[in-house]
Amino acid sequence: MKKSSLRWSAVCDNALSFSKTEGIERPMEFLKQFMIFSGLNDEEFKQIEQIAVKRTYQPRMFVFMEGEEREAVFFIKSGLVKAFKIDEDGNEQVISILQSGDMFPHVGFFDRSPYPATAEAVQETELIVIRIADFNELLMKYPEMTIKVMQIMGKKILDLQERIQGFISKDVQHRLTHVLMKLAAEHGIPQEKGVYISLPITNQDFANMVGTSRETINRTLNEMKKKNLLTADRSGIFIHDTDWLNGCNEG
């Protein structure tokens, strides 16, 4: 895997610290939005405040890298995080784009397995971090949290199965429209005529999500633009025809 010295030094400089001096100013209200914490009372949330720290990452800084010892669970307060793996040919395969309100990683609780993928900040990102040992203690103390984590993991498994099936049976355009539909559902902002996906995703990112070359994505997106199905710039994508998008994925 190729890494620039700048990005690699950023990982070292931003190594996780769980010092008490890095405690967050009242993260209670933010954490209450997460399904896994629903049902906890204020006193129980105060216990979580004691073990949570805040970390800020600049664009292109790694949160963690695939294969590293797993230290923590992360909750996105603001910003975007890209999770990806590197295949045997050195190509990046994007697994997911995570935003405010998401937690990650979704696997490896109660064992010592390493991080299953690399997580990188796409833009300036603020994370709330809980050490994995402390998080496991929470799961043991509050069984209802464990059930909710299992529900989240189950949904991720279903998403992965759908993606694998799409890779096997669909062409590039169908795979790309599936990605666009998923991004619209998770990150889209409904407009009067269409939906706006406010994500700074590059054509190379799309290629890595779909499993093709950037040139093929450029050509496919240009064909969609000519048909006035979507428009795109560096800040995001506007899908003009959501009916087309849904119909394409049903076909």
Image (spheres, rainbow, N blue to C red):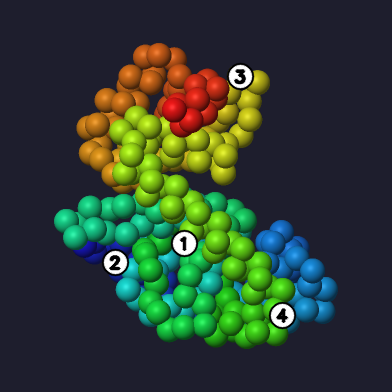
Q: Earlier in the sequence, mark 3 or mark 2?
A: 2
Up/down of 14 relative to 190, above or below: below
For label 2, the SS is: helix
Quarter of the view holding residue 248:
top left
Label 1 neighbour load within 10 Å: few <14, some 14-19, many 20+ = many
**How far apart, in angstroms, are the residues tagged by discs 4 and 2?**
37 Å
Up/down of 126 relative to 108, above or below: above
Across and down, in percent, residue 159 comes to 49, 51
Quarter of the view holding residue 2:
bottom left
The residue that mark 2 highlights is: 8
At label 4, the amino acid type is Tyr
The residue that mark 3 highlights is: 193
The residue that mark 1 highlights is: 57
Q: Earlier in the sequence, mark 3 or mark 1?
A: 1
**How far apart, in angstroms, are the residues tagged by discs 4 and 1?**
30 Å
Label 4 neighbour load within 10 Å: few <14, some 14-19, many 20+ = some
Q: Earlier in the sequence, mark 4 or mark 1?
A: 1
Quarter the C terminus occupies = top left
